[in-house]
């Protein structure tokens, strides 16, 4: 088959993404206004939540504790099971026959080189969360292991890193694959706007333009708001702890609120001035700073131990992957439930609430990639980054604690989650300068996260407009800051964790539907491809034996009875033969679809290029 013929077959198959096979273009989002049935319900929900929390913080704190306990008791097994399912689903898509489907038109080349794409995925994997938990999580799992885990100090240290890798590795990025892949297919292959609703078009059809689509985008928008606010809250908690270690300010609520307000002013200045290139510069600068921190700790710390630990802990993670993935602390009673709420259930909820945010970013940068490349790159690159980060920062803390038990613990023998990183840095040369650098690192991550978060939320609220109006982004910056303040005042870290776990519950159902919708879309495309390919094969058979003759009306395509019978047996009985590859028309028209693919146009919808905005000036999301 000629290459042009293959392209036409694939373009015919690409039109199979909608339930009806119709290629009627869906109007692109217009940047002049928000979608009122998405923006206003989301705004009312979040503003009402903030008002309740600020007016009655004590009642809100008790409510959050009750919600967290109820959800963890009733749905802990569900969060663990669904996270494992997303891993299996992502790997299935990557290794199945769907892996060759291109996220774009068949002649689209990748928008970024492989190394540039990897660097962008690397950037997406960095953020406030890694800085906050880089030391505190492995150290906490070492000092207070998951109920049921026992062993020597060395065994507990190894298990601590393995548990941390579980929370930050394959599971997190498989959750992002579910959203990112479905969205990349919709915006690059089907030319749909950048909005979560279009991931369900193969399943819901035109209903995504109505109430169902609005409900999906509202859930995604509210989830993104809470996810970003959770990250910002964690960043402020750690910054206040760092200022306390430096003797600058007490780590109280007043300090935390002032930090949020000051940083939000910088974000608003960026949004109102339109200095998007400045955000890109800050993001790149922060990645360099994070890399310097890792290299510095490798050089001044126990280098050989850290490198050996990095390699060995990867093996431990792989060896225990399945068991850790399905562990729900079923036999550890209340202690197990409390541990799950603080760690695994919180993480799965946090990643699910963040999925629209990160998914939109990785979808936008993945034009021209195949499904297999997308799955492999999105899962492997950030996971390896996370393992290296925790092996160096967490490994450094574990080495200190193994050599001098209690050196990094507080007076009660517990780990200070907010201040653990700064306590560890006090043990290395040049601690004062390094601590200032880390504070700057967190502050910049805060700014870039809030800025890019406001952009993504603006996209969802406007139905996919890539450059939402400044007042929309300003609104989301302000609401995110208010939400972070409200959560900190009503329970601190517990409230942040509860928010992530709660909002993930409804959106996880949407994600399950997205999985179903993705399989439906990919199956339709493969079937359409196969039918068009068989039709062209039959045409070649007829052409080879000279069986294509002019019909009475002078139209080429009349065929002997035996050839029509063969078409019927192949399900192609109503198809009209495609022109021979040697004819000029062959290079311009795709095979005419048969009855099984009626309505599938040879080209994708003539859509406004809603998905084609450049990423040159946009900072990646940080978790």
Image (cartoon, grey):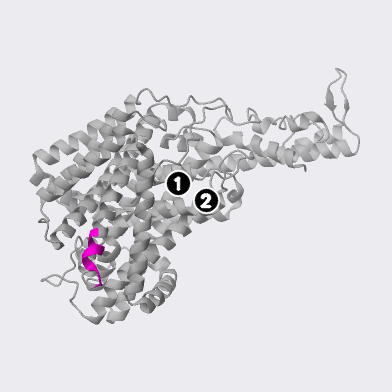
Work out whether residue 39 or residue 477 is closer to the camera in this orientation and state it: 477
Q: Where's residue 550, x and y in %?
A: 88, 24
Q: Helix, strand or loop at disc 2?
A: helix
429 in magenta: yes
Farthest residue in the right direction?
A: 546
Q: Mark 1 Cα within 10 Å, few/some/many (few <14, many 20+)?
A: many
- Write the residue at 31% across / 67% down: 393
Q: CA distance from mark 2 to mark 1?
A: 9 Å
Residue 39 visible at all: yes
Q: Is residue 556 above or below residue 524?
A: above
Mark 1 residue element: helix
Residue at horizontal 35 percent and vertical 43 percent from the top? 279
Q: Quadrant of the N terminus?
A: top right
Residue reaching furthest to the top:
553
What is the tally of numbered marks visible in this picture? 2
Does residue 169 sit above or below 209 in this rendering?
below
Q: Which residue is mark 2?
A: 374
Residue sitting at 41 percent across and 69 percent down?
317
**Above-or-below relation of 170 to 605:** below
448 and 247: which one is in front?
247
Q: Which residues are magenta?
A: 428-436
Q: Is residue 201 magenta?
A: no
Whether pointer 2 and pointer 1 mark residues with C-beta atoms closer than 8 Å, the reply is yes
Disc marking residue 362: 1
Label 2 Cα neighbours within 10 Å, binned few <14 / some 14-19 / many ≥20: many
Q: Position of residue 15 (x, y in %)?
A: 60, 33
Along the line of sight, which residue is nearer the eye, 191 or 527? Answer: 191
Residue 66 image position (x, y, % from top left): 16, 50
Which quarter of the picture shows residue 301?
bottom left
271 relative position to 260: left or right: right
Q: Name the one closer to the observer, 217 or 404.
A: 404
């Amino acid at each position: 088959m000629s290459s042009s013929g293959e392209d036409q077959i694939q373009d015919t198959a690409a039109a199979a993404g909608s339930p009806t096979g119709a290629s009627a273009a869906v109007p692109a989002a217009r940047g002049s206004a928000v979608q009122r049935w998405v923006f206003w319900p989301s705004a009312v929900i979040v503003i009402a939540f903030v008002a309740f929390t600020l007016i009655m913080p004590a009642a809100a704190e008790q409510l959050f504790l009750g919600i967290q306990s109820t959800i963890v008791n009733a749905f802990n097994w569900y969060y663990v099971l669904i996270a494992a399912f997303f891993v299996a689903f992502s790997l299935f898509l990557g290794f199945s026959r769907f892996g060759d489907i291109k996220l774009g038109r068949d002649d689209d080349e990748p928008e970024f080189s492989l190394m540039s794409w990897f660097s962008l995925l690397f950037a997406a994997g960095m953020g406030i969360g890694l800085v906050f938990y880089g030391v505190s999580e492995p150290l906490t799992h070492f000092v207070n292991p998951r109920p049921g885990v026992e062993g020597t100090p060395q065994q507990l240290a190894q298990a601590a890193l393995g548990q941390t890798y579980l929370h930050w590795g394959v599971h997190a990025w498989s959750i992002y694959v579910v959203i990112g892949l479905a969205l990349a297919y919709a915006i690059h292959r089907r030319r749909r706007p950048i909005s979560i609703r279009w991931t369900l078009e193969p399943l819901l059809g035109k209903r995504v333009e109505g109430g169902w689509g609005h409900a999906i985008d509202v859930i995604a928008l509210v989830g993104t708001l809470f996810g970003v606010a959770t990250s910002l809250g964690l960043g402020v908690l750690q910054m206040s702890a760092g200022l306390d270690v430096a003797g600058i300010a007490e780590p109280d609520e007043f300090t935390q609120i002032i930090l949020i307000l000051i940083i939000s002013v910088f974000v608003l200045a960026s949004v109102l001035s339109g200095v998007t290139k400045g955000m890109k510069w800050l993001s790149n600068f922060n990645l360099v700073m994070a890399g310097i921190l890792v290299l510095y700790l490798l050089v001044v710390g126990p280098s050989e131990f850290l490198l050996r630990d990095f390699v060995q802990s990867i093996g431990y993670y792989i060896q225990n992957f399945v068991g850790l993935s399905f562990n729900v602390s079923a036999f550890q009673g209340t202690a197990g439930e409390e541990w799950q709420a603080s760690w695994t259930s919180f993480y799965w909820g946090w990643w699910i609430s963040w999925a629209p945010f990160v998914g939109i970013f990785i979808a936008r940068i993945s034009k021209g990639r195949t499904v297999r490349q997308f799955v492999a790159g999105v899962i492997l690159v950030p996971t390896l980054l996370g393992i290296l980060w925790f092996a160096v920062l967490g490994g450094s803390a574990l080495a200190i604690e193994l050599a001098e038990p209690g050196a990094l613990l507080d007076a009660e023998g517990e780990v200070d989650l907010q201040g653990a990183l700064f306590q560890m840095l006090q043990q290395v040369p040049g601690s004062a300068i390094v601590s200032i650098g880390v504070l700057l690192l967190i502050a910049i991550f805060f700014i870039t996260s809030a800025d890019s978060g406001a952009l993504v939320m603006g996209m969802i609220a406007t139905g996919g407009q890539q450059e939402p109006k400044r007042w929309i982004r300003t609104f989301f910056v302000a609401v995110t800051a208010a939400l972070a303040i409200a959560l900190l005042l009503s329970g601190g870290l517990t409230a942040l964790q509860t928010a992530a776990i709660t909002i993930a519950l409804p959106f996880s159902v949407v994600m399950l539907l997205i999985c179903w919708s993705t399989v439906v879309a990919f199956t339709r495309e493969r079937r359409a491809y196969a039918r068009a390919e068989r039709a062209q094969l039959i045409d070649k058979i007829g052409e080879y034996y000279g069986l294509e003759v002019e019909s009475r009306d002078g139209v080429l395509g009349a065929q002997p009875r035996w050839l029509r019978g063969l078409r019927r047996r192949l399900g192609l009985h109503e198809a009209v033969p495609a022109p021979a590859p040697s004819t000029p028309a062959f290079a311009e028209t795709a095979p005419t679809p048969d009855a099984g693919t009626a309505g599938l146009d040879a080209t994708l919808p003539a859509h406004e290029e809603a998905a084609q905005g450049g990423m040159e000036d946009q900072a990646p999301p940080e978790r």
